[in-house]
Image (spheres, grey):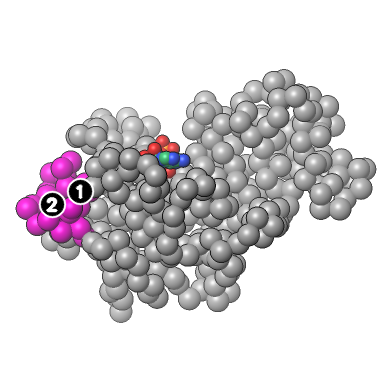
Amino acid sequence: MAETTTSTDMSKGKNKSTAASSPAAGPGGSAEPLLDIQGLTLRLPASAAARPILDGIGLHVGRGETVGLVGESGSGKSVACRSVLGLLPRTAETEGAVRVNGTDVLGLDKQGLRDMRRNKVAMVFQDPRASVNPMRRVGAFLTEGLRVRGLSKADALARAEQLLEEVGIRDPKGALRKFPHQFSGGMLQRVVIAAALTGDPELLLADEPTTALDVTTQAEVVGILQRLQARHGTGMLFVTHDLELAAAICDRIYVMYAGRIVESQPAADLFARPRHPYTAGLLASTPRLDPDAEPPKPIPGRPVSLAEAPTGCAFADRCAFAEDRCRAEAPPLVTQGAVSVACLRADEGILP
Ligand SMILES: Nc1ncnc2c1ncn2[C@@H]1O[C@H](COP(=O)(O)OP(=O)(O)OP(=O)(O)O)[C@@H](O)[C@H]1O
């Protein structure tokens, strides 16, 4: 039977925890999802922002699961992802919970955060060159984290070689002696992924890890992430603005717009039958490889800036289906079974 719950009272920016936003068991069968974000609101009071950067978002990632977080630039994907590592602006005010294996990251002190980053959660960013020190050899970069974990120099070097092999670097010994500028972007991203694996993380946060790479290299890096994830059983939150890529590699997808989750579905269902007009717009605007596919059609208008705080649905001004009530009333995120959607007209069959 379909379960219907309002997981986030978005109209008030307040949070209600529900069974739907916090599933009883992840795919690994454990009682708690690996990552469980509930009602996360993030404000920057000192800034010119008229609304929160994140407004009551909820998402979960189970063990071994790949979950996509998609949306246009500025929707809050990176901030949501970084909140899991406690990497937030110093002046940020938060409400809600970000639990990793049951521990609320938002309540951790510096040491707690350091331990979590070292042992449980790793992150791969968009630009691999921003993740490395250009003056240090790759060997020093990779063994540093391993030495901190108590490995001898020889063991750390052996493990670093093994990790480089795992990410498909053919001459790992030679690679350890090189400096970052001696690698192409794709190869350096492999090194950064190897570094992320030094602590055997249970959760990998991948923030647009392929955006800065050319298409062929993108596919290779995605393949590596998928293989490693399958081998190590790592859960992955994959942030991207590329809905087609997300649909290809993710089990489930969350769609963000203006700091809110507007839709979530299993990846194949979301691609086949989007429920939110914004998701449908994103899909229609994605270029397809299929020569018979419709040409991409951009979503009209522009995303809502942080200086604007619409009263109703933030997407209404760009939505072909918006009615007066959509501009007056913010739609709550309603969950029915595996589908969550925040659109007042979602049940009217407005989308083809
Ligand atoms: N440290 C900060 N100070 C002020 N505003 C910030 C800060 N970090 C993020 N923002 C703002 O928060 C909003 C969400 O940013 P975020 O980087 O999470 O978006 P995004 O969806 O990841 O976009 P992109 O795909 O461009 O990275 C943006 O309007 C951004 O300008």
* Chief secondary structure of the magenta portion: loop
Report the residue marked by disc 1: 310
- The answer to whether residue 263 shows anywhere in this view is yes
Query: Which residues fall within the magenta stretch?
Result: 311-331
Q: Quadrant of ligand 1?
A: top left
- Which one is nearer the viewer's eye here, 44 or 344? 44
**Residue type (three-letter) at the residue carrying disc 2:** Arg
Residue 319: name its quadrant: top left
| Alpha carbon distance from label 1 to label 2 | 8 Å
Residue 227 to residue 298: above or below:
below
User: Along the polypeptide, which appears first: circle 1 or circle 2?
Assistant: 1
In x, y percent, where is residue 23? 45, 72
Question: In the drawing, does residue 291 fall left or right of residue 239?
Answer: left
| Residue of label 2 | 327
In terms of depth relative to the viewer, which is nearer, 230 or 293?
Answer: 230
Q: Amino acid at mark 1?
A: Pro
